[in-house]
Amino acid sequence: MSKEGVVINMFPPTNDGTRRGAGIVRENDGTNNGAEFVFQTPQDVSDTPLELNTKITFEAEGNDARNVKKATVAEPNIR
């Protein structure tokens, strides 16, 4: 099941998801205390570039995040 969250850390600091490294996401559970998951870059990332505070979706496997990608925002239906 897909989860929503935000990127809270990237290693090394200049990593945008395309370089070898890691990142941490915090699940959006309605509080600021959501569970945190670790992902490896670039293999767990399917949409780049990523940066801190990017809203994302991901698949959780234990404490790991897989298939990390930017969350899509629905366009308003204005007529």
Image (tube, grey):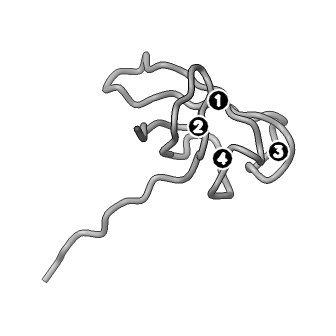
Residue appearing at x 41%, y 21% in the figure: 32
Image quarter where the C terminus lies is bottom left
What's the amino acid at mark 1? Answer: Ile
Q: Residues within 10 Å of mark 1 (few under 14, many from 20)?
A: some
What's the amino acid at mark 3? Answer: Thr
Name the foreground residue: 65 vs 77: 65
Residue on which the image places disc 2: 7
CA gap, disc 3 to disc 1?
14 Å
Marks 3, 1: nearer the viewer:
1
Q: Residues within 10 Å of mark 2 (few under 14, many from 20)?
A: many
Q: Secondary structure at mark 3?
A: loop
Residue on which the image places disc 3: 14
What's the amino acid at mark 2? Answer: Val
Name the foreground residue: 42 vs 50: 42
CA gap, disc 2 to disc 3?
14 Å
CA gap, disc 4 to disc 3?
9 Å
Residue on which the image places disc 1: 24
CA gap, disc 1 to disc 4?
11 Å
Instruction: Tell which circle, 4 or 2, labels the residue nearer the N-terminal end.
Output: 2
Decide: is 33 above or below 17: above
Image quarter where the N terminus lies is top left
Q: Residues within 10 Å of mark 3 (few under 14, many from 20)?
A: few
Contact between marks 2 and 1 (CB within 8 A): the answer is yes
Instruction: Tell which circle, 2 or 3, labels the residue nearer the N-terminal end.
Output: 2
Marks 1, 4: nearer the viewer:
1
What's the amino acid at mark 4? Answer: Glu
Label for residue 51? 4
Position of residue 23 measured from the top left corner of the image (x, y, whole percent): 70, 33
Instruction: Tell which circle, 4 or 3, labels the residue nearer the N-terminal end.
Output: 3
Q: From the viewer's perspective, is 42 left or right of 75?
A: right
Contact between marks 4 and 2 (CB within 8 A): the answer is yes
